[in-house]
Image: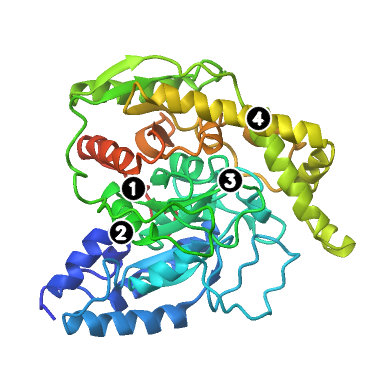
Amino acid sequence: MSSHRTDQYALADCTAHELVQLYRTGQASPLEAASAVFGRMDRVDGTLNAFCHLDPEGAAQAARASTQRWQQGTPIGPLDGVPVSIKDLILTRGMPTRRGSATIAAEQPWEVDAPVTARLRAAGAVIVGKTATPEFGCKCETNSPLTGLTRNPWNPAKTTGGSSGGAAAAVAAGMAPIAIGTDGAGSIRNPAALCGNFGFKPSFGRVPAWPLSPFGTVAHLGPHTMSVLDAAMVMNVIKQPDARDWTSLPFDPRDYLVGLNDGVRGLRVAWSPTLCFAKDVHPEVAAATLRAAEAFVAMGALVEQVDPGFADPLDISTGLWFLGAWQVWNGLTPDQQALTDPDFAAQAQLGARLSTLDVQELHLRRGALGSHMRQFMGGYDLLLTPAVSIPAFDALPAGHRPMDAQSMLGWSPFSYPFNLTQQPACSIPCGLTEGGLPIGLQIVGPMFGDAMVLRAARAYESMHPIPRPDLNPLL
């Protein structure tokens, strides 16, 4: 190993790409990186509560094996030795997957990896633990009776968003440079926007899932990272098909690192500051995202302010979501139902009101929206919007206000339409409020245009690097 060592504490602030470069040159080892990440957790996660399960012994064992491989010059994959966390909705061998719910016992065999977890292991990633989620991923705030409140690294009094709030907080605070989340109505992009990191929702089916979400074909899996380059590295690993997911897309041979730095010059970009229906966009969010759209002009993109031309599909998204909650609720015993989050219970009861005809009409309206957006995107390479309409609000416990469609998603009107349409979309930081809270820009691509979204995000990131929160108040 080189005598020019990298400070171990600083390793917690390295991106995945930086860590791999340090491993390659002998300036750091996977074992040192894992130690740094767990050291960061010791310092800050008591306040942030991003993790619901840690596996220091398993991570140390994997990191030692990776360190040996790097010393022998035989890494087994592009993420060999990189610390990674997994959202608690995703099966992970040897760790409980309680889905944020006290209704699921931790003390049982956990012998199977979900496809995304298996791909990461095969690439040499070091899985450090499971990140917090609201119960069954049911809302865009990360709180639950099981795990309590997850807090924002930029200001612990504020929410992380959700449902991948633990994933976003973990990455922003340097508790592993990669986190895998899920996104059924904005659950990757909303926390990424509020916690100030990069969150990518791929085209539906690009990253296989198993078991499939009870909330249906709106649920995507994707990465949280502190750089777009890291996200492209992760996507190269986790986009491999898996026969257990019958909805997964065919094999995509593309290397997402190729062309990542090609820029946006000449691309046709639609800029929609409200999607024509978003009300009460915070002035600082509106100003920051407008500046980001103008940055695309400066980079040579052909930007046109235009709305896609569809009505707010909030009732479609929440209707399908509440129906899924009702299905899960009916699989619980009365004793289990008594343990659930009041927000989840309220969603289930809203789902119970839907008739068969209601559900069929929701599916038909969703299909019409998907067709509309396929046609709209025929004229544009990308669509830009704010990621979330407001900065992070106060972190509050489960059940803090009555659950309905507006309280669930009304503050995030830019996210859920693109779960319904299954398009790839990301959130990338584009500024801070006067109070020092992150603001996110959403970049939406045409269906299967995952590489284009990453390329555009990389172009913006190259001119506007992703900032880190000041963790000193937490230390």
On the image, numbered disc 1 is attached to which residue?
468
**Circle 4: residue type:** Leu
Foreground label between 1 and 3: 3
Foreground label between 4 and 1: 4
Give the Cα distance between marks 2 and 4. 46 Å
On the image, numbered disc 2 is attached to which residue?
13
Q: Which of 201 and 32 is in front in this view?
A: 201
Label 3 or label 4, whichever comes before in sequence order: 3
**Measured from the top left, where is residue 2 in percent x and y?**
11, 78
Mark 4 surroundings: few (<14), some (14-19) or many (≥20) residues within 10 A? few
- In this rendering, position of residue 165 left or right of residue 431: right
Foreground label between 2 and 3: 3
Using the image, determine if residue 438 lies above or below residue 331.
Answer: above
Q: In which quarter of the image is the C terminus?
A: bottom left
Q: Does residue 341 appear in the picture of this structure?
A: no
Q: Which of 423 and 333 is in front in this view?
A: 423
Label 1 or label 3, whichever comes before in sequence order: 3
Foreground label between 2 and 4: 4
Mark 2 surroundings: few (<14), some (14-19) or many (≥20) residues within 10 A? many
On the image, numbered disc 4 is attached to which residue?
364
Whether label 1 touches label 2, CB < 8 Å:
yes
**Measured from the top left, where is residue 384 in percent x and y?**
38, 26
Q: Quadrant of the N terminus?
A: bottom left
Foreground label between 3 and 4: 4
Mark 1 surroundings: few (<14), some (14-19) or many (≥20) residues within 10 A? some
Give the Cα distance between marks 4 and 1. 43 Å
Whether label 3 touches label 4, CB < 8 Å:
no
